Image (spheres, rainbow, N blue to C red):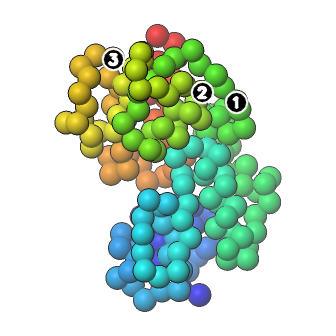
Amino acid sequence: MKIITTPMCEEIVKLAGICDYVVNKNPDEEDGDLAILLSESKVEMNSLAIKINTPRQVFESIKKVSETVQNELSDVDVLTFFDDYELCRKYLNSDFKQNVNVKVYSKFLTDIALDMGFNVVCDDFDYVIYPDYLKDEVIESENLVEIPSHNCISKNPFEKIEIRYSILENLISI
């Protein structure tokens, strides 16, 4: 089976034990059997869509990809990938509730805010969380929190989570 993955999903593909694959931002440009890509992406070929915004999504995506290629990893195997990432481990199986209301400007940041236990609201919010690429669309002017998007941050999903969650954890301690 010829597997094509996007740059954002390559680390998940590697962790799932796949060694033979092609990386292309546009998988349909390749002649492949299966594309592994972010859930927001669409391709013509057979595909496996994954999400990697939260620690739980990363865990589930590694499992899903490993099952797809019949190289199923155990939960214990997957958990070892989290060993060096404090915030990833902290939020992996936790159910946090924060007394902080946030307005969020994107779906991927909504996933993160909910995972961290923030109350996502439209009105009467304490902070506005937005991705860097939507900076010009933010209409609020106070208590803004800019989060690096996919193109301005490490492709490693664990490092990405550590950076984004650390920015948002600062809101809890303010």
Residue 169 x %, y %: 51, 23
Compared with residue 64, is residue 110 higher up or lower down, i.e. above or below? above
Element type where label 1 sits in the image = loop
- The residue indicated by pointer 3 is 143
Query: Mark 1 and mark 2 in contact (Cβ < 8 Å)?
Result: yes
Element type where label 2 sits in the image = loop
- Residue at image position (47%, 82%) is 45
Residue 157 x %, y %: 51, 50
Element type where label 3 sits in the image = loop
Residue 117 numbered mark, or none: 2
Instruction: Compare residues 151 and 138 and report the one nearer the observer.
Output: 138
Rounded to the nearest angstrom, the CA distance separating label 1 from label 3 is 25 Å
- Residue at image position (48%, 38%) is 110
Q: Can residue 8 be seen in this view?
A: no
- Residue 151 located left or right of residue 112: left
Q: Which amino acid does label 3 sit on?
A: Asn
Q: What residue type is labelled 1?
A: Asp
- The residue indicated by pointer 1 is 95
